[in-house]
Image (spheres, rainbow, N blue to C red):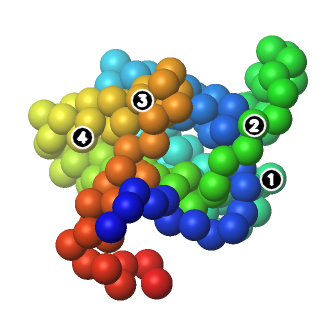
Amino acid sequence: MSYSCPLNFQSVDSYIARFIALNVSVLLIAYMVTFNTFILYFLFFDFMMRLFCKKEYSPLFHISRALKKVFRLEDKFTDGGAKRLAGYFGLFFILLLIAGNNLNIDMFSIAVSVIFLFCALLEAFFSYCLGCKIYFIIKKMYPNFMN
């Protein structure tokens, strides 16, 4: 089986995805310093808007689009399937963080935050989508996954 990403035949701008990952990273660092639950609920709202509604409703999408204009970056499109799967993983991490925070399990919250931060920084600085790699592993074990 050759390497493949989850194709959904929709393109997303790679630079906007990277700026969103950078913004998520900054917010995660702010959460790890303050343990402010508002940050987690904001991230939950933003991920929900991008995954289940229109991405234009997402505040981080607007910030990232503005940053792309400020830096005058050309459009660079990539398949949106991997980014969507990574978004589901991100939403799962946020739900774990909200649960850990509400149960006052600080070490669990820090551990989940570090893992989530690592994934977001990989995307932000190296354009390395861990969701695509995980998809490939799952697809190898379960060939009918996401069909």
Give the image quarter of residue 119: top left
Of discs 3 and 4, which sits in the foreground? 3
Q: Amino acid at mark 2?
A: Lys
Asked if 61 appears above or below 71 in the picture, the reply is below
Horizontal side, residue 103 vs residue 83: left or right: left
Q: Residue at x 73, y 55 (%)?
A: 11
Circle 2: is it few (<14), some (14-19), or many (20+) Cα within 10 Å? Answer: few
Alpha-carbon span between mark 4 and mark 2: 31 Å
* Kind of residue at badge 1: Glu
Percent coordinates x, y for residue 126 in the rendering:
48, 25
User: Between marks 2 and 3, how big is the CA–CA gap?
Assistant: 18 Å
Q: In the displayed structure, does residue 32 sit left or right of residue 83?
A: left
Q: Which circle's residue, 3 or 1, is located before the other in the chain?
A: 1
Q: CA distance from mark 3 to mark 4?
A: 16 Å
Of the numbered discs 4 and 2, the one sitting upstream in the chain is 2
Amino acid carrying mark 3 in the image:
Leu
Q: Which residue is mark 3?
A: 122
Q: Which residue is mark 4?
A: 112
- Observer-side mark, 4 or 2, equals 2
Q: Nearer the viewer, mark 1 or mark 2?
A: 2
Local secondary structure at mark 4 = helix
Going from N to C along the chain, the mark reached first, 3 or 4, is 4
**Foreground pick, 68 / 31:** 68
Looking at this view, name the residue that lies furthest to the front.
Answer: 2
Q: Which residue is mark 2?
A: 76
Task: Give the crowd class for mark 3: few <14, some 14-19, many >=20 residues within 10 Å.
Answer: some
